[in-house]
Image (spheres, coloured by chain):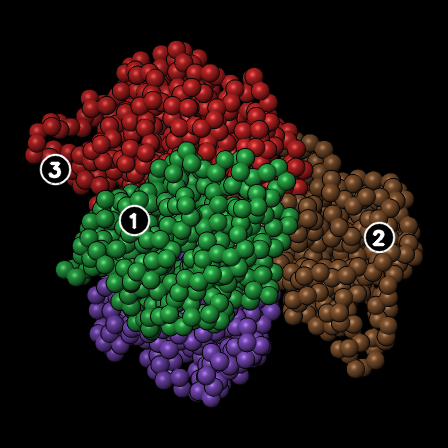
Chain colours: A purple, B green, C red, D brown
Amino acid sequence: MSGDRRSAEEADGSGRLAAPVIPRTMRSAVIFGPDDMRVVAKPVPEPALGEVLLRVEAASLCGTDLKIRSGSFFPSQPPPGTFTPGHEYAGTVVALGPGVDEFRLGDPVVVEAHRGCMRCENCVRGRYTCCLNYGRSDKGHRAMGMSVDGGFADYVVNHVSTLYRLPAAISFEEAVMLTTAGTSMFAVDTMGGMVAGETVAVIGPGPVGLAAVQILKALGAARVLLTGTRESRLRLGRELGADVVIDARAANAAQAVREATGGAGVDAVLECSGAEIAVDQAILMCKPAGRIVLVGYFHGPVTADLNRAVKTGLTLHTIRGEGNRAVGRCVALAERGLFRSSPLITHRFGLEDIGEAFDTFAERRDEAVKVVLEIGARA
Amino acid sequence: MSGDRRSAEEADGSGRLAAPVIPRTMRSAVIFGPDDMRVVAKPVPEPALGEVLLRVEAASLCGTDLKIRSGSFFPSQPPPGTFTPGHEYAGTVVALGPGVDEFRLGDPVVVEAHRGCMRCENCVRGRYTCCLNYGRSDKGHRAMGMSVDGGFADYVVNHVSTLYRLPAAISFEEAVMLTTAGTSMFAVDTMGGMVAGETVAVIGPGPVGLAAVQILKALGAARVLLTGTRESRLRLGRELGADVVIDARAANAAQAVREATGGAGVDAVLECSGAEIAVDQAILMCKPAGRIVLVGYFHGPVTADLNRAVKTGLTLHTIRGEGNRAVGRCVALAERGLFRSSPLITHRFGLEDIGEAFDTFAERRDEAVKVVLEIGARA
Amino acid sequence: MSGDRRSAEEADGSGRLAAPVIPRTMRSAVIFGPDDMRVVAKPVPEPALGEVLLRVEAASLCGTDLKIRSGSFFPSQPPPGTFTPGHEYAGTVVALGPGVDEFRLGDPVVVEAHRGCMRCENCVRGRYTCCLNYGRSDKGHRAMGMSVDGGFADYVVNHVSTLYRLPAAISFEEAVMLTTAGTSMFAVDTMGGMVAGETVAVIGPGPVGLAAVQILKALGAARVLLTGTRESRLRLGRELGADVVIDARAANAAQAVREATGGAGVDAVLECSGAEIAVDQAILMCKPAGRIVLVGYFHGPVTADLNRAVKTGLTLHTIRGEGNRAVGRCVALAERGLFRSSPLITHRFGLEDIGEAFDTFAERRDEAVKVVLEIGARA
Amino acid sequence: MSGDRRSAEEADGSGRLAAPVIPRTMRSAVIFGPDDMRVVAKPVPEPALGEVLLRVEAASLCGTDLKIRSGSFFPSQPPPGTFTPGHEYAGTVVALGPGVDEFRLGDPVVVEAHRGCMRCENCVRGRYTCCLNYGRSDKGHRAMGMSVDGGFADYVVNHVSTLYRLPAAISFEEAVMLTTAGTSMFAVDTMGGMVAGETVAVIGPGPVGLAAVQILKALGAARVLLTGTRESRLRLGRELGADVVIDARAANAAQAVREATGGAGVDAVLECSGAEIAVDQAILMCKPAGRIVLVGYFHGPVTADLNRAVKTGLTLHTIRGEGNRAVGRCVALAERGLFRSSPLITHRFGLEDIGEAFDTFAERRDEAVKVVLEIGARA
């Protein structure tokens, strides 16, 4: 994925790509109903004001995609028969909408999922992942692959504020992991940003948790403790930099974390599992004045000893998505070799085989961690 | 309480009070066992380095005092037969320990409860209410009336960092409410400090919640909504500035808050009730990106829809006590007439009648809100 | 006029807004060259996506307007002969652009001056007054009355994110002061937001400084010290709540501030004068760890004892305009009676007399503070 | 020596610390007057409450030491003939004062220079390097080697809050650089902590600036640009990780920084030179909304285009010393190999040769960067 970047001459001097580059129709995975996703032909979309058209080169599957396929529609999701999911992808800029000079044709980019309405009070204050007009595309909000069409297709339209230019050192396949990593990075932002010298626990060695391990170490954390229930994932976590891994089936995770810290507890916890028990565990793991970030989605009500949180002055932050331009910071870490995508990628499929890709990811076949779709010729 | 402040001449020029002022023994309420508190004679303590001796003029009862009387000992509480509770009080400086020049003899002061060890990493960073040496008086930590003797006595020793000089406009009785108010103020600090123009819900019209109503309005909040279950308290809340009061027995409090805000929800919630259901309610009340501060202590595990918190980007802060010099800010508001103590004080007793004072407060006799002990001659 | 631009009478059965509400042309003050501003007829603009058309009811003059009239063009200012200044105004919503449901026809509103591009990294992070595309209207940035046409006209187009609905208690004339006050409020935000109990100095009793005095007191500041060189302005400052006023001609202002604080200095300084000497003075006024906000524009290089700032750990913040939705907080304070506009307004003119209005303001005739243009029938 | 001051050999059966470990007198560099520093015998000090006695193993010279030797006395400096400077050192814990259990005899530690009074409002809020009782040792404040005796001696007393335990991987000599690095780290803290993905300029390749280069890279900065006037220092900066080095004699540094960033400017600037021109340059280097930290001490008034700072929304932070426990974070980075001390150390002397050490450092003989005193046997 190094020498094959689109050369500048593919774009003519006028700012338009040569005619054959962008066809009228494209392949696109479309949700027709619960558990009914098919790859069909759709018109290639056109970029509007401030947007670009991307040729998707690679994409990856996220837990949210599984929910979408199985029928958990977002309130503002486009109707069945038209909607294309996919919010983790990287591609090549192939057309520019009006007023775009931030990117040039041929630029390789990776995306973040959220564009806020940029007019509500949260967006105006920089909290665009908490947009008060969430799902209202008439007001400019876009959750790619959730409230509008996403990247499981040959082409997709993105707003320039959701794009990050890729340096030559990062392949498209590697880049798609950086959207995932953006969530982990945003969690670190949200709990204060500065983790140098700190001891941090990560609950849940899924892709976000494993990315968090790397990011915490890259930002100077002294020690990272990872808890989980799958041995292969914990082993991977150790390879990626976790100083201590704890098998939560074999041990009381909170107690093990306390023991591993000489009884002191940790400065911060990133909860990336979505397990209902994890909040209570996180509270038990923390030092007084510690910070917890809830990253995972929970399936039901959560019960926890919040009185301990009150008595020890903890803060429970939450995040959704990857705000504050966190993906850009991940690109920077990856360029410097401080974040490695490859160990997270276990499976690759073509777009036509997206059904098998989903099954592989959903069933965690062969210890699947991240499943990538190779869509473009250059993925 | 205006013209009768101790005049300067009561203290001689040497920095010592005249002989008769400080006796060798004093009256002191002492915990002998569960539900066994008696007023007995104890030696007057002596101030050490950085400390002063106060003659207690007025004190008030807090929910924590009820727990202490009924036998819920703090891990580091002094042994039965010696321990004097009381952490909300105001008094007169009557002796200075070595190295004290921040106060002069005769100064009227109000206290905060916590002095950190000032050597652990939390204290060094300004988080002294989360001291890692909580309860270790050998290291300098003092939770007045909890881990060391407090103010239900004629005299008490305080570190200078826990004292705030009272302006002439504030009586001792009014001053003791400011320790309570300090908790409410610290909650506001913790959620960001700036509430001007915001809509804030307060759950629980106890003393801390009622103080919060006043403080939020004093700091420029546009609207304050108060929810509770006692009609008299809600009425009082309205008198103190609440724009909307909601009877949580008659209505779903969260739904009522949303309706009262046109469906939008509030910017922030101060949870001051300690009711297990309140966290779930607070989450439902908030706008995306809203802040919740958990101020009340919970009696057991709390169950809440934390997934909604995650999906809407909420932050759950917690506080314990009144850190960050919050009591001082309350003194300033009270001096300017922006915080009124009197409406909160419903009952007054002498020190000898402390048992009845506790019963009145515990049973909320006659709609008791705050019960004050008039201890000194000038209370 | 497009079909989706509904006229005001459609929404108003009262007959107050008589048809035809929106003419094709309007009166507009236009800059033709240095010191050459004339009121001419211009087409009424049309609101685009996310915008509304306002009928301007009242506007006020700011120091920046003086510079604009005298020829200090902004780099991105529209060309002479077309450009209409004016960035402080209030009016009535008379037409809605596509996709607008935040406001209704007939709504009275006040404005803020800045709409960011909402796509650069500063805008995306909530720092829209520091937009990296400042002046680039092709990318969506608008500095009303500076980089695009403003409010010294019968009609003006604003983006919804720059508007705040006025409660009935605030007149249009009073409202225009709130744009000015927004700058003062933003300065308070920027230095941390929480000023309760603090002692703050304000340098420069111009409109922004005088507004700052009120806002600081409204947010609970214990003491506000105002320094300036005009006796009438200092007197007004005292009426508006300043606890101490210092005539900077008669005294060394910094020394006077220190004396008035018992030698301690202040917690924070708002520099609103733009005087080159003021930074040095502000540094001398501050306690260790104090905060300074530079609000005034300086005319040339500033010389100051920055070494003292370093040795005492000061922070020098700066602001431009009124970001972070500060105007909305001022509306809330004004509605509660905590901010009074009337004392700041000394002169009123019709739009046709804008030249005299400018002269009055520029020369501070008759102790002019704020000069208001009564433009609409309901000003 | 009091009975509770255990000697080191009591704790160490290895015989490494041979008896009698602690003599009654020691070698100590003492300031007798301007440019008159001599190594004389002084009594070994005793640790008080919360303090330990260290045997100094290694120390290093800082610019402040040069000022002290040449006669620039701190206001609160001990009198000539008694005062021992030195605030960068590492050593071995050889005796514990009362109440100390944070350290054990034999522990290797590195220090930070400041212990606040821990009772003023700044200390209580975590701003101990801005202690309002600076220099008042009667109130507990200690600036080691500045307001009380420091580490250019065989033994020194430190408060436990100023000590950081050294892991085995860090030698005493390497450790002393970490006090210097603590200043650079504190600068990063102060400007927000999170520099991942950012472009940062460092002005001044002195020890603090060179340490800053390493720390910025260790915390994930994308690009670090270093400006200076000495070729050897710039070369060293590049070895330590600077992506771009700029010779400020050959180029306009600010312009060069802008060019190296494609005209955009940098996200932040650390001013570590103390050159009066540097503030103006820093302002020119920054993007809108950028942050500047003033780390260097200036010799006289500073002139800068602060109007540009105001117009672009910059913040000028300042720091003094190494607060917020920054040295501890440097120890963590060094342990992980992310901070290398060795390249900064150019010269080594014994304590007896401290005069030559000072001369070497003052005159920058042989391209001296950091000059280390090897004091203990284990340096």
Q: Chain of mark 3?
A: C
Residue C11: mark in rendering: 3
Viewer-closest of A352 and D67: D67
| Residue at figure coordinates x 86%, y 76% from the top left | D18
Kind of residue sitting beneath label 1: Leu
Residue B208 in sight in this render: yes
Nearest to viewer (mark 3 / mark 2):
2
Position of residue D349 measured from the top left corner of the image (x, y, whole percent): 89, 59
Disc 2 and disc 1 on one polypeptide chain: no
Provide the secondary structure element on which disc 2 rests. Answer: loop
Kind of residue sitting beneath label 3: Ala
Kind of residue sitting beneath label 2: Ala
Relative side of D120 to B351, left or right: right
Res A187 quadrant in image: bottom left
Q: CA distance from mark 2 to mark 1?
A: 68 Å
Viewer-closest of C264 and A9: C264
Judging by the rendered image, the residue that carries numbered circle 1 is B344
Residue D368: mark in rendering: 2
Does B113 sit above or below residue A57?
above
| Residue at figure coordinates x 43%, y 40% from the top left | B332
Q: Chain of mark 2?
A: D
The quadrant in which the N terminus of chain C is found is: top left
